[in-house]
Amino acid sequence: MRRPIGVLLPPVRADRIRRGDLYRVLRMAVLEGVLSPGDRLPSTRQAAADYGVSRGLMEEVFQQLADEGLFQRSVGRGTFVAPEIARLERPARIKEQKPRSSSRSSRRGSAIAAQAGCREPDILQAFNAGIADTSEFPWRVWLRLQARAAREMGPAALNFADPRGLPHLREAVARYLAQFRGIRCTPRQVAIFNSAQQALSALTVLLLNRGDAVWIEDPCYLGARAAFDLAGAVTVPVTVDENGLVVETGVRRAPRARLAYVTPSHQYPTGVTLNLHRRIELLEWAGRNNSWVVEDDYDGEFRYAGQPLASLYSLDSGARVFYLGTLSKSMFVSLRLAYLVLPEELLEPLANVRTQMDGFTPALTQMTMSLFMDEGYFSSHLRRMRTVYRVKWKMLADGLVPMAAHGWTWSDNPAGMHLLVRHKRGEYVRQVARSSSLDLALLSRYRAARAQDDGLFLRFGALSPERLQAGVEDLAAVAMKT
Ligand SMILES: Cc1ncc(COP(=O)(O)O)c(C=O)c1O
């Protein structure tokens, strides 16, 4: 293996570089921390070639800095920034910047930047841990498959990848969806994205004009609302009751909406399921009106009673439904892989949109994931995680039982990695959230307008059983005391 050359050296602004220029620039780079203690410098030969000076001149500069104690040189090893530099008090590396007025952003940009998208908290605790539990992830298998993917793809993995997704992964996803989600589609209908968020953004570009009405659930997943806001669509919140989206309300409020976004298997955040009657109503409305439906099946794999529910997509005979899935929940969030099932004729236009966003998804990650699926590791991982989350879901639901006597209710749909507990008196719920040291999100945050009642959105995915148990005990204690 070739030895790494060393750090990149800072540029020198001069037509003709003199010894003094080089010396000053390198000295300041060390003192200001641009070069860090212990950094390895390139050889004098390499540095001389980079600066376009003679090797003799470079040698003189390095030696002077070594004489001053800023560089350390040793035969055979090379030249390094002296570790003792760390003890010097350095001039501020970056000058303090004056706060700038927001007038530098556009009006649209400021409005968008004023709201944050989905970010996980720095510290995972009860009950902000909506991300996947990775403690059981077969890491060694993943590393082995990653190496195999690199070997099988060879240097081709370093080039542009297909904006539609790697054919191998699109085939594996189509097979998986047929087996586990009752979705009949060909690999030519599957597009791979870095995230459900990105797939939504690409879809809005392709399908929506500014000002188009879009039904969103009320309460709604904030990521979806953000994607539609970003597209300049007019979001129309449609009530969700115990049977899911109240289609009738949507039809009354925006009969000609261009698109409806739904989470039918496990509504986010209420946890209810869209019943069959409403599913049919929704598809009929979309067919009559020539509208699209986006089915976000973000955690459809995790249902702990009976079989996973059939998808809305599988009921649709009119090719109006886009089926969106993410591997953020079923694998791990930083995998950055999601898939979209769409009508075949939209694949190429969507791929063109993608090339104008970030191009494509890294091929190596896609290849590793497809091997993970082909070799059966994905289904075993899902099976294992279903048990892990089922145990946690039950632990949480059991821990909430004492709160029922105080008027708290929650959905009894055993699914996913979150649970919403509600109470008729919103002020009381907000008081509980304020007096607790837990990280509790309020249902009102996900709603379009303030309502009488409120709720606590408890996300437990990555919590250990011990922390989950302690968390729910704390919550119940605060709720009873308040
Ligand atoms: C409703 C919903 N959709 C999608 C996602 C995940 O999407 P992504 O693939 O963008 O990480 C989440 C994650 O929390 C979610 O809650």
Image: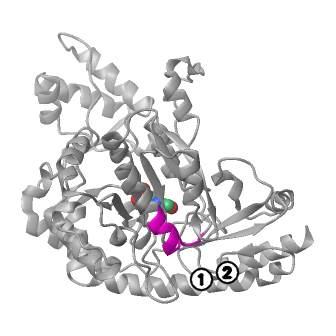
- Amino acid type, mark 1: Lys
How packed mark 2 is, by other alpha carbons closer than 10 Å (few <14, some 14-19, many 20 or more), is many
Q: Is residue 410 above or below residue 39?
A: below
Label 1 crowding class (10 Å Cα cut-off): few <14, some 14-19, many 20+?
A: many
Q: Which mark is residue 392?
A: 1
Q: 148 or 28: nearer the eye?
A: 148
- The tag on residue 396 is 2
Residue at 46 percent across and 33 percent down: it is 211
Q: Which residues are magenta?
A: 271-281
Measuring from the top left, give residue 471's x and y in whole percent. 72, 74
Q: Is residue 270 left or right of residue 289?
A: right
Dividing the picture into quadrants, the one containing residue 431 is: bottom right
Query: So how many labels did they put on this image?
Result: 2
Q: Is residue 366 magenta?
A: no
**Which residue is depicted at the point 86% across and 81% down?**
405
Taking the spot 38% from the left edge, 35% from the top edge, the residue there is: 209
Residue 61 lies left or right of residue 450; in this view the side is left
At which x and y percent is residue 96? 57, 24
